[in-house]
Amino acid sequence: AQVDVREIIFQPSQQTGRHSHPCPVVGYIAEGTALFQREDEAEPRTLVSGSAFYEPADAVILRFDNASRTDPMKFIAYYLLNGEQELIPVLPQG
């Protein structure tokens, strides 16, 4: 139905917390390094500048964090929406 594109900047050591999305999300790391881990993965992955990522709809994301303690991290996210949807409901810690 529509694509919502966001440029998002995380400050040093900023973390998302446990969350999900009601729609698929694709994106890439424009600057910096992220730690990314879905609930079904044993270890977080390191995503460096230029790396792409995919978050399936309704998948629980344990972390999508800025890996740096000193530098911001910027990423571009494409939310593949089906009508009006909340982009990022935060979930209780599991």
Image (tube, grey):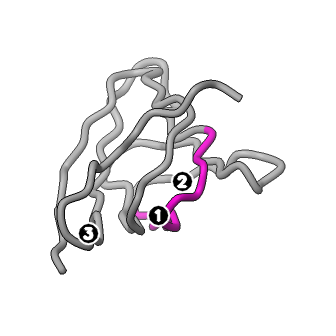
* In this rendering, the label closer to the viewer, 2 or 3: 3
Percent x, y for residue 57?
Answer: 48, 65
The Cα–Cα distance between marks 2 and 3, rounded to whole angstroms, is 24 Å
**Residue 8 lies in what quarter of the image?**
top left
Q: Which residue is identified by label 3?
A: 81
Amino acid type of the residue tagged 3 in the rendering: Leu
- CA distance for labels 2 and 1: 6 Å
In the depicted structure, whether residue 34 falls above or below residue 50: above
Q: Crowdedness of circle 2 by 10 Å Cα count: few (<14), some, many (20+)?
A: some
The residue at which mark 2 appears reads as: 47
- Pick whichever of labels 1 and 3 is earlier in the sequence: 1
The span from disc 1 to disc 3 (Cα, nearest Å) is 22 Å
Q: Nearer the viewer, residue 30 or 18?
A: 18
Of marks 2 and 3, which one's residue comes earlier in the chain? 2
The residue most toward the bottom is 1
Compared to residue 84, the image places residue 45 above or below, namely above
Residue with the most extreme front position: 84
Looking at the rendering, the stretch of residues picked out in magenta corresponds to 50-62
Residue 51 got which mark? 1
